[in-house]
Amino acid sequence: MESNQDIKQTVWNIQHECLEGRIDVVRAIDLIDDVIGDITRGEYKDGLKFKIHNHGRMFALVCRGLRARTIPLVHAMAVYAQTKAIEHGNRLSGEIHISRDASTKHHRGGISRIAESYAG
């Protein structure tokens, strides 16, 4: 069994691969889901926090100090992480707040547009 630190490093490596364009957003979240043992919650607040949870742990991902071209990828990763939590049947799947026009709380249409732009 991998240690918590090994799992965190693997999650960070997967995110890095995605931000470098080596794997797509959907594949990255699928890999993270496999590594941590089911995403149960995704949380994102633009430029402040990006967390993915499983049944017992929280994994913080990079969301600050990014190049402008990678920010939309992080947004899409957050949207897909929450979508994966919903697919796993979690009622409290987290909240994603990207902008005034894209939020799971009040502006679901913006979230849908982000998801559609990265759909495989």
Image (cartoon, rainbow, N blue to C red):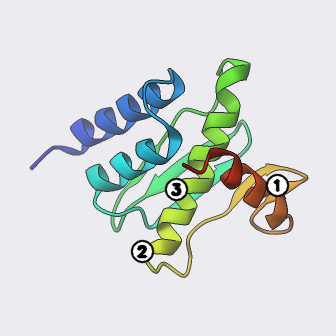
- Residue 92 relative to residue 54: left or right: right
* For residue 25, above or below residue 97: above
Q: Secondary structure at mark 2?
A: loop
* For residue 36, above or below residue 68: below
Q: Residue at x 52, y 56 (%)?
A: 81
Indicate the position of residue 91 as horizontal and vertical percent values: 54, 82
Q: Secondary structure at mark 1?
A: strand
Q: Secondary structure at mark 3?
A: helix
Seen from the viewer's position, the closer of residues 54 and 117 is: 117
Seen from the viewer's position, the closer of residues 92 and 114 is: 114
* For residue 64, above or below residue 57: above
Indicate the position of residue 94 as horizontal and vertical percent values: 60, 66
| Residue where numbered disc 2 is placed | 88
The amino acid on which the numbered mark 2 sits, given as a three-letter code, is: His
Do the CB atoms of the residues marked 2 and 3 lie less than 8 Å apart?
no
First along the sequence among labels 3 and 1: 3
Q: Alpha-carbon distance for marks 1 and 2?
A: 23 Å
Indicate the position of residue 53 as horizontal and vertical percent values: 44, 59
Which image quadrant for residue 97? bottom right
Indicate the position of residue 28 as horizontal and vertical percent values: 43, 42
Q: Residue at x 53, y 49 (%)?
A: 51
| Residue where numbered disc 1 is placed | 102
